[in-house]
Image (cartoon, grey):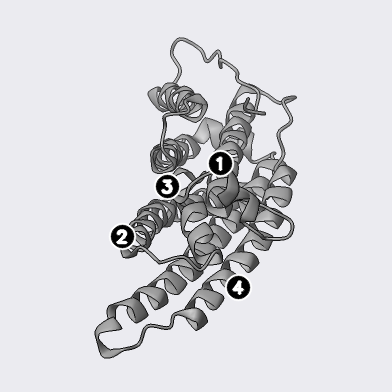
Amino acid sequence: MASYHTRSFSFPSNSHPVSEQLDQQLNRLRSSQAASTSSLSSKLSGLNDLYKCVEEFLQLPQNQKTVSQSQQVLDGSLRLLDICSTSRDVLALTKESIQDIQSVLRRRSSGELDITKEVAAYLKTRKSSKKTIKKCLKDINAVDKTNESIAIESMLKDVQALTVEVFNSMLSYIGGSQKSSWSFSKLVGQKSETEAATSFDAVDAILVKKMNVDMSQLVNLESEIQEIDEVLESLFRHLVKTRSTLLNVLSY
């Protein structure tokens, strides 16, 4: 169950179309976040669309006057920007390690069969990534989610709260199994590699058990990382633009 508070904003009947569009995007993304069939990329794409509306929303003079009093919204924007950036760093490191393993596997014809070094580097990267993600999941709760504010500020806080929910889903997916000992023995004992909770878990499990590496799984995970990162790159730009607008408004 999502932890944010859903609201229906009662704007005047003659309210600006951008306000109505933002409210519609919020409701659409809430539905996507609640649906178990919605993919991570779909949710992140929904965030992209949401922040496009936020940018237009913040350009309205009447909204800028209200937002100029909200330091909490500005602080929240910085935390979300940091989490988005950190997530991209984690994905980049994981992708690099996967490519190193693939590179060795492609050179099998020349007799280079040992991927022990590359697997160890991958697992080390994943262990470090899990620690980073665990910290992000803890820090993300610091984003303000209070409700005692007027409609315009409440809408922006709802945007941030919903962003928190999607980022939580993303970090949990990328982090995969968060075993304290970072051992996948129990995971593999309960599920086959193809049934692991996420694509990240599936590859982790195979490499931890030193099983025969399926190149197709590495390629699929690399492709998935690329897809997620492309959406995050666009979202990062929107978050930067939103924060820049908030800084400009608060400096008036």
Q: What crowding class fits label 1: few (fewer than 14 Cα within 10 Å), some (14-19), or many (20 or more)?
A: some
Residue 251 appears in the picture as rendered: no
Q: How far apart are marks 2 and 1 (CA)?
A: 25 Å
Which residue is label 1 attached to?
Answer: 169
Residue occupying image coordinates x 43% and y 83%: 114
Please name which of the two marks, 4 or 2, marks the residue nearer to the observer: 2
Which residue is label 4 attached to?
Answer: 124
Q: How far apart are marks 1 and 4 (CA)?
A: 23 Å
Which residue is label 2 attached to?
Answer: 216
Q: Where is residue 186 in the image (x, y as percent from the top left)?
A: 64, 50
* Horizontal side of residue 6 vs 21, given as left or right: right
Q: What crowding class fits label 4: few (fewer than 14 Cα within 10 Å), some (14-19), or many (20 or more)?
A: some
Q: Position of residue 69 (x, y in %)?
A: 69, 39
Disc 1 marks a residue whose amino acid type is Ser
Mark 3 residue element: helix
Q: What crowding class fits label 3: few (fewer than 14 Cα within 10 Å), some (14-19), or many (20 or more)?
A: some
Residue occupying image coordinates x 50% and y 74%: 119
Residue occupying image coordinates x 50% and y 30%: 33
Disc 2 marks a residue whose amino acid type is Ser
Q: Are marks 3 and 1 in contact (CB under 8 Å)?
A: no
Which residue is label 3 attached to?
Answer: 194
